[in-house]
Amino acid sequence: MNITVVGTGYVGLVTGACFAEMGNTVTCVDVDSTKIAALEEGIIPIYEPGLEAIVQENQKAGRLRFTHSLEEAMEESALYFIAVGTPPGEDGSADLSHVLDVAAEIGRNLSQDAIVVNKSTVPVGTAAKVQAVITEQLNARGVAFGFDVVSNPEFLKEGAAVEDFMRPDRIIIGVESERARQVMADLYHTFSRNHDKLMFMGVRDAELTKYAANAMLATKISFMNEMANLAERMGVDIENVRKGIGSDSRIGYSFIYPGCGYGGSCFPKDVKALMRMGEEYDFETRILRAVEDRNQAQKHRLFEKLTERFGNDLSGRVIGVWGLAFKPGTDDMREASSIPLINQLTAAGAVVRAYDPVAMEEAPNHFAAELFEQGRIILCDHQYDALADADAMVLVTEWKPFRQPDFNAMKKLLKQPVIIDGRNQYDPYSLKVQGFDYSGIGRDF
Ligand code: UGA
C-alpha cells in the first residue's frame, strides 16, 4: 500500500518505518525541514532501540522517504495518518491545533477519495472535528471527494516501540464505514496473523479506549504507590505485598511496581486531558483526580526521605543521582521524577552529581542554566563518578547497569553509606548487612 504519515515524532516515525518494513511504500512528512534533512541522511532524532536500523534499511530499499511537503506526498497516496503532537494546553486539555492544521491542509490538497487516520492521542470527538475541517476546505474549493476519518490509537511504549508495533496486543480501529473497515483490515492483517488482534468499534469508542488504557495503568501505579507509603508506616515490606497480590490473575503483575512516580509524555498528559474531558461533560472524575494527586506527591518522596535523614537544610551536602530519564530505555525526560527531585535538592542547598546512560545530552534542557554554571548540578561521565564524596546515592531510573552495582566500590566512594532506592531494585536485608542505610519505596524498616 502507499501510505503518508504526517508527523515524524516518536509515534509517526515508528508507524512509518514499521509499515515500510512490511513492504508498504511510506512517505513521512514533517514541517520541520531540519528534522527532515537529518532523516533523509538516516539520522533519527530520538533514542529508540531498533528504529534507526529499520529506517535506514527501508530508505535504502526505496520504501521509506521523507519530505516537508504534504501536498507532494498526498499526490501518491490515498491513506493519510495524522501522527502530530497534542501537547497539553494550560488547562490540561489536549491542544488540537497541530491535528486540525494537518486536517485543513489535507482538505486543501485532496484530489481523490481517501482515508484519514488519527494516530495521535486525541480527545473524544476529534475525528468529527477533523471531518468538519476537511469538509470545510473541500466546500471552499467547490469539490467533493469521499473520505473517512478513522481513529487508530497507538499503544507503543517508549524503549520498546518497534517491538510493540510489530507484535501488538491488540489493534484498535474506530471506523464508521465498511470501506474504511476494509482498508484498515487489509493494512493491519499482517500484524494480526497469530490470532485476530483487530478490534473494530466506533470512532468515539476508539478515542476513549486510548485514554482509558493509559488512565487504568496510571491508576494501578498510583494505587500501588499509596499502598507502599502506607506499608512504610506499618513496617510492612511492599515487595511481599506486590508479589502476593500480583499472583491473583485478576490483578496481574504488570504496572504494580511502586516507585517515585510515573512520568513521560503520556500518562501525566493523558490523565489530565481525561479529567478535562470529564469537566466538559459535567462529570467529576474523582478517581483520576486521586491518581494525579498521588503521583504529584510521589514525586516528592525521594526528597522527603533525604530530608528525613539530613534535615531540611542540605547546604554542604552532595547527592549522587543515578538515572535522569523518565524510565529506562529512553533519553526522554518529559515529566521525569528526576526533575522535581533535583530542583528540590538544589533549592535546599545541595549539590547534585548526576549520571544517566543516555539522557546526558537531554538533561540541560530540563533545568535552569545557572544550576550548571554555579556547579549545583554536575553531570558525571560515569555512574560511580556521581557518588564521589556524596552523602547519599539516589536511584531514580532503573537502568540495567544500576541493578547490580559494585556495592563495595559504592561504599568507598560515598561519604555516608546512604542509599535511597526510588525503584526498589536492591535487597534491603543484604544492604543492611553490608552496612548501608537503605530506604526503598514501601521498604523502609
Ligand atoms: C505508555 C503506555 O504504557 C503505552 O501503552 C502507551 O502507548 C504510551 O504510554 C502512549 O500513550 O504513547 P510510556 O509512556 O512509554 O508508555 O511508558 P511506560 O512504560 O508505560 O511507563 C510510564 C511511567 O510509569 C514510567 O515513568 C514508569 O517508570 C512508570 N511505572 C510503570 C511505574 O512507576 N510502575 C510500574 O509498575 C510501571
Image: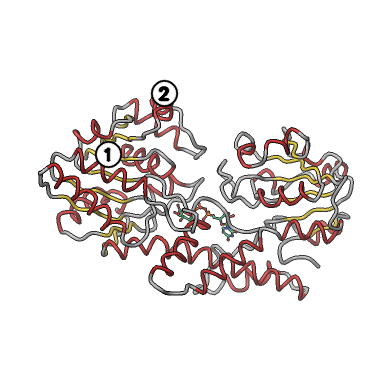
Give the color scheme: rainbow, by chain, secondary structure or one colour.
Answer: secondary structure
Which kind of residue does numbered mark 1 sit on?
Thr
Residue 301, position as x, y percentages in the image? 72, 60
Residue 299, position as x, y percentages in the image? 66, 58
Which kind of residue does numbered mark 2 sit on?
Glu
Front residue of 306/275: it is 275
The residue under the point 42% across, 65% down is 212
Q: Verify CB contact (< 8 Å) between mark 2 and mark 1.
A: no
The residue under the point 26% across, 58% down is 128
Q: Which residue is mark 1?
A: 4
The answer to whether 319 is drawn above or below residue 428 in the figure is above
Residue 185, position as x, y percentages in the image? 22, 53
Q: Which residue is mark 2?
A: 41
- The N terminus - image quarter: top left
Indicate left or right for 135 with 92 as reference: left
Q: Quadrant of residue 109?
A: top left
- The C terminus - image quarter: bottom right
